[in-house]
């Protein structure tokens, strides 16, 4: 059984004058899903959210919410609630008044407003703050009030436009947990825009990766992480980002000159002779310190884990995630090892993934 679709975009596009921001794209977001639009700045993710909300009019295409064509409807008639990057709270109103504002505008009864505000405040742990004004709140508390105001609209579709980008690291982590819990409690459809891949990986059950307004790949977070369709997705999803080294296939052997490695291709892998980009994630590389294969340029030691930034003798950068104990000498050298099937191969011209399966284990730790 397939899940019911909450939002459907059909050949939707947006241009500003002669500048085409979003070429025609189609997308289905399932009911009750948590969909995250992610990509670098200027990729069109916020524009796409504004098209769904009705804050921007599409150049072409249709938008359906709950099976209803809302393409020409005003934002207030689309049955959605939106949470912005800037909290947009009314400074002269209390927390309770801000949360209940949309209900007052809709001329709801006072007792209904009071009941809903109390219910939402309890859900967001805002009850002790109901009499305060926004200036007396922290950034995380203000964002929870903004979310609470959206909840009182009584809709099943929520749109979030980079709501955590103004918060410090600790508050961002706290609010990620709050939003995930809220989604689980409500069972509502949520669409979330961010440039932060950590937010995308931890919140989404559907990630949409965008580049230049074009959807590169859509899927579950771990599917995109383990099986990216192209080099862009491979490099963007994952923290720290994937390493890319030059490689060449000759007679069913993958040569990686920067590492002095020769990797036999698996029997099921049929690739023509030629150049490829070899991708391998930092956590898939084991290293020995000290060693003699690569030169250490910089170390980010976070206590439980260290990220070693090294250079091959060919001048290519390699990041290694190291969990061993002991100090790592700057400007020293390391040796590395990895399993061949952790190496992804990408076409250097198109960026498309070509293969993931070689055989055996490579060690440069001798």
Image: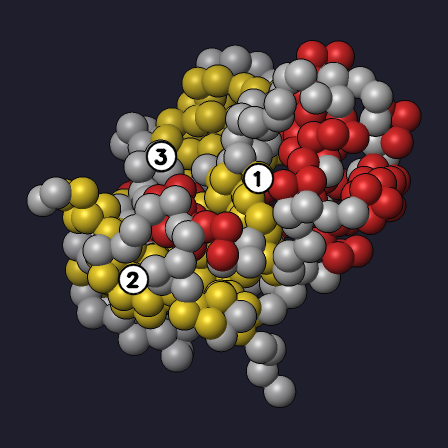
Label 2 crowding class (10 Å Cα cut-off): few <14, some 14-19, many 20+?
many
The residue to which callout 2 is attached is 12
Quadrant assignment, res 157: bottom right
Quadrant assignment, res 204: bottom right
**Residue 356 % position (x, y):** 42, 64
Query: Is 242 rendered above or below residue 362?
Result: above
Label 3 crowding class (10 Å Cα cut-off): few <14, some 14-19, many 20+?
few
Q: Secondary structure at mark 1?
A: strand
Q: Tell me the residue at 28%/32% (across/down).
A: 314
Q: Which tag, 3 or 1, sits closer to the chain's start?
A: 3
**Residue 230 % position (x, y):** 33, 57
- Residue 210 lies left or right of residue 140; in this view the side is left
The residue to which callout 1 is attached is 83
- Residue 52 lies left or right of residue 134; in this view the side is left
Distance CA(mark 3)–CA(mark 1): 19 Å
Q: Which of labels 3 and 1 is toward the front?
A: 1
């Amino acid at each position: 059984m397939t899940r019911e679709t909450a939002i459907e975009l059909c050949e939707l596009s947006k241009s500003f004058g002669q500048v085409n921001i979003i070429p025609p794209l189609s997308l289905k977001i399932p009911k009750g899903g948590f969909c995250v639009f992610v990509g670098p700045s200027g990729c069109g993710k916020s524009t796409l959210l504004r098209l769904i909300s009705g804050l921007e009019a599409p150049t072409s295409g249709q938008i359906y919410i709950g099976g209803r064509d809302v393409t020409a409807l005003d934002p207030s008639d689309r049955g959605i609630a939106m949470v912005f990057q800037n909290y947009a709270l009314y400074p002269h109103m209390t927390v309770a008044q801000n949360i209940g504002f949309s209900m007052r505008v809709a001329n709801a009864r006072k007792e209904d407003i009071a009941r809903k505000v109390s219910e939402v405040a309890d859900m967001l742990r805002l009850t002790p703050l109901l009499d305060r004004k926004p200036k007396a709140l922290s950034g995380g508390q203000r964002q929870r009030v903004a979310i609470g105001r959206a909840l009182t609209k009584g809709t099943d579709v929520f749109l979030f436009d980079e709501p955590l980008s103004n918060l410090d690291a600790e508050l961002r982590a706290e609010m990620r947990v709050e939003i995930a819990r809220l989604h689980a409690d409500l069972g509502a459809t949520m669409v979330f825009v961010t440039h932060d891949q950590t937010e995308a990986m931890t919140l989404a059950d559907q990630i949409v990766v965008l580049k230049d307004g074009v959807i590169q790949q859509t899927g579950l977070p771990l599917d995109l992480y383990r099986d990216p369709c192209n080099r862009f997705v491979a490099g963007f999803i994952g923290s720290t980002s994937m390493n890319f080294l030059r490689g060449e296939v000759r007679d069913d052997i993958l040569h990686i000159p920067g590492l002095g490695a020769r990797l036999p291709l698996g029997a099921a892998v049929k690739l023509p002779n030629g150049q490829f980009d070899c991708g391998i994630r930092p956590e898939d590389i084991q290293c020995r310190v000290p060693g003699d294969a690569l030169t250490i340029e910089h170390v980010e030691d976070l206590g439980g884990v260290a990220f070693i930034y090294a250079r091959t003798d060919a001048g290519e950068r390699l990041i290694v995630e190291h969990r061993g104990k002991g100090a790592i000498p700057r400007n020293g050298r390391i040796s590395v090892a990895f399993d061949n099937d952790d190496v992804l191969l990408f076409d250097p011209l198109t960026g498309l993934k070509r293969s993931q399966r070689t055989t055996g284990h490579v060690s440069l730790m001798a």
